[in-house]
Image (cartoon, grey):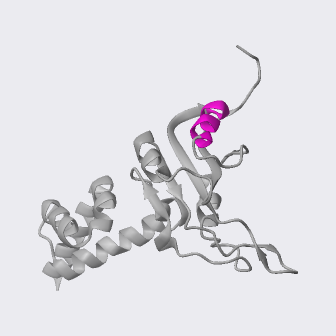
Amino acid sequence: MGTKNYGKGRYWAGLIYQDSCPMDWEERMRFSGLQILVSPLHDSDIADPKTGELKKPHRHVIAMWSNTTTKANAEKFFAQFNGPKVILRLESPRGMARYLVHLDDPQKAQYSPRDVIEINGADWRKLALTNGSKDEAMSIVRVVEDEGPDGYFTLLKICQEKHKELLDFTTRQVVFCREVIWSYWHKLRRE
C-alpha cells in the first residue's frame, strides 16, 4: 500500500456532463445509499463572454458520506459518471450547495432551487440556507396558531397531513414544539 495522503472528508464535489454520463446516473446515485445533491442542468453557463459561447452542459454534484472517506474512495464513486477526474473535498458544503444554483453569483446564469435533485434524503435548503431552522421554527409557530393542536401528537398528525416539509423538523425539535403548543394554550387561557 502506498504512502500517498489522499486526505479524508465527508463531503465531496464533482461534475458530470450531460453527453458523457451513463443514462442511469440518477439510479446509480440512489443505489449508492449516499445522500447526494445534484444541480439543475447547467446549460446556460457562458464559457467566453466575448463570443457568448456556452460551456458544455453539466451538473454539479455533492456526495455526502456519513463518515469520513478517502479521496481515492470518492474518486472511485465519481468515476462511474465519466466526469472530470478532479473532485474537491469540501470543508463546508454550504457554499457549494449555494453554487448549485449560482445563488451568490448573480452575474452567472441563475437556476431554480426547485430543480436541485435531492437523493436519499439530502436536503438542499438545510445545507444552503443558514436560516432554514429559524424559518421552520416560525412555520411551526404559525401552524400551531392556525390549527390549535392540543398536543405534540396532534401537531405531528397535522404536519404529516398538511405540512410534510415540517415533519423532519417537528420530530427533531420535540421540546421546542411542545413548548410552542403549551405557550399557545397558556396565552389563550390568559386572554
**Residue at left offset 67%, top offset 77%:** 109
- The magenta region covers 70-79
Height in image: 72 above or below 164?
above
Q: Is residue 86 left or right of residue 26?
A: right
Q: Is residue 78 magenta?
A: yes
Q: Is residue 7 left or right of residue 28?
A: right
Which is more toward the observer, 174 or 191?
174
Corner quadrant of residue 162: bottom left
Residue 8 x, y percent position in the rendering: 65, 33
Which is more toward the observer, 11 or 152?
11
Quadrant that contains the N terminus:
top right
Residue 111 x, y percent position in the rendering: 58, 75
Which is more toward the observer, 147 or 68?
68
Residue 120 x, y percent position in the rendering: 40, 50
Height in image: 86 above or below 100?
above
Q: Is residue 64 magenta?
A: no
Which is more toward the observer, 127 or 45?
45
Q: Residue furthest right?
A: 50
Total labels: the figure holds 0
Residue 181 x, y percent position in the rendering: 21, 68
Q: Residue furthest top?
A: 1
Q: Main secondary structure of the magenta part?
A: helix
Corner quadrant of residue 134: bottom left
**Residue at left offset 48%, top offset 65%:** 125
Q: Is residue 138 left or right of residue 18?
A: left
Q: Is residue 42 left or right of residue 52?
A: left
**Residue at left offset 18%, top offset 73%:** 186
Height in image: 91 above or below 112?
above
Quadrant that contains the C terminus:
bottom left
